[in-house]
Amino acid sequence: MTDSISNVLDAFDSFSTDDVRSIQRLQSAMESESVVLATSLNERIALGKEQRGRTNLGLWNRLESVWQLAASRLCGRERTGTESNNGTGSGSGGGGEDANLGFLLALARFTRNLVAQVSHNQLQAYRCEPQIRQCVHYLTSWIMLQRQDVLPLTRMLVQTLSNMITGNPELCTSLWTVYMADAEDSNILLRLLAMDDVKTLVACLVLMLNTTTAKNEPNRVLFVESRAGQRVAIKLLTKMESLFDAPGDSPGANTYDIGYQFLRQLFDQGLGVTLYNSLEHEDPVMPHQRTLLKLLDGYLQALSTSLSIHPAYAVSMPSLYTSLVFKTHGSIKASLSAPPDPHLPALSEALVLSAQCCQAMLLRESESGDRPTYQAMERETMNGTGCIELTIETLRDLNTFLPRIEMGKAIPILQSKRRPVQEPTEADPSEFPYLKRDLIRVLGTLAYRNRAVQDRIRQCGGVQVVMGHCVIDERNPYLREHAVFTLRNLLEQNVENQGVVREMKPLRGFDADGILRDIAES
């Protein structure tokens, strides 16, 4: 037994709440031993196995007893009314509230360093988790959050919880099950994620990351399916949206990166769309759902071709796209005869993101014999209308809702005799960037060397709709190029579609400057 171990055990043995000197001695011993424990694995192992004690309680029983006392004193359950109000309470035997906080900080640091990477110590110390959680809950109350001096203690307590379970799947599951069962505001994850202190946020996210990493796949499913997990996800996504533009080397950017690592674990397990659906609200699309789609889109776009996309997305993403295009189309139709639907911009953004996700998956499958995303998008329907047909109808009504701009002038879209011309309702075009372009891209990718899709697009008048987008539109840069490519895919080895193009008598043509004008003028 080393002198430092002997010293700290003696301090635990002689600890008494009625003796200020014994309290100070234990605090000093823990502070000194914490320095040794931080750098010596052997010291942590030796101290964790030491059961000596004149009271026969051993280290771990003593540690639990001290945690119970410290948590009780911090939360004021053993203070008198005067002590709680004026901050002059005796705390753990005396010295005031500041002494209480200092003692607790030493206790948290000692426990944090003692349990690091030693499974036996983690298991023994885990009995103190309720008291540590109680302390975090108190320190994240509104009153305590007004005090900057408690932030280091809050971070230390969260780091203690993290070290207590890291690398121990059984303890990870135990802790996560408890936290995911509390969907109320008492959940410390919710309280920590609501804080503005970046360092505390990092400590919280590391705890979440370590609890769900490696062999803890069931914990991720529980996070997505539980009400508590869904509330935590909303807090996390809201926080990440606020940190999105943080400079690359700033603490905020580091916080964002750790949050993304946590979410990436869910994405890797195929839970991205499942989480999106679990966050449904009475509004069609919530801000945190759009943030989630942005992250999922970036994940799919950046995924190396050597890594496979989880097969769950081949089913869930086409289903989500179909649902969003259905809702967007309904919102556009309603906006043609009434003031614009206030939910339409959010729906449009979500539809663009889901279209980009589908596009990334379709392109990965384009040269593959196994094409589950293609097959799913061909099968998907909503209220009896197929995904492909819904996309065509949405593009058709978008032309009325958002007339294209040619050299600063709005150009009305010619309608067939079967569809009366409606005056477009005023809307802010800046709220619908890339919508036409990405819907056209999806159609073009689906139609590539796919006779069934080519025929379906022709049968619902889609060839004409695509041709109508082969023009300059200042609101949609490169829309014409994507439309031309899609038209090429529709006509390839399809005589019927080629015949539709031949039958259409062009009323307008491109002049030498590439501007579409009436044929009589050119």
Image (cartoon, rainbow, N blue to C red):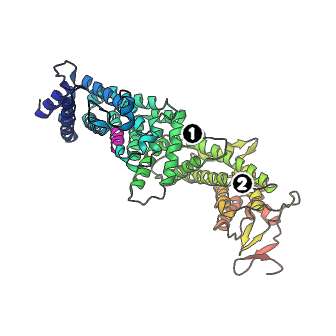
Give the number of the mark in front: 1 or 2: 1
Q: Residue at 74% across / 51% down in the picture?
A: 331
Q: Secondary structure at mark 2?
A: helix
- Dot 1: within a 10 Å radius of its alpha carbon, few (fewer than 14), some, or many (20 or more) residues? some
Image coordinates of residue 176 in percent, x first then y, are: 43, 32
Magenta span includes 153 = yes
Q: Magenta residues: mostly which secondary structure?
A: helix
Q: Which quadrant holds the C terminus? A: bottom right
Q: Is 348 displayed left or right of 256 in the figure?
A: right
Q: Secondary structure at mark 1?
A: helix
Q: Tag 2: residue type?
A: Gln
User: Which residues make up the magenta segment?
Assistant: 152-159
The correct choice, above or below, for 307 with respect to 63 in the image is below
Image coordinates of residue 135 in percent, x first then y, are: 38, 34
Q: Which residue is mark 2?
A: 454
Mark number, residue 67: none
Q: Is residue 464 visible?
A: no
Q: Residue at 22% across / 41% down in the picture?
A: 38
Q: Which residue is mark 1?
A: 274
Image coordinates of residue 139 in percent, x first then y, are: 40, 38
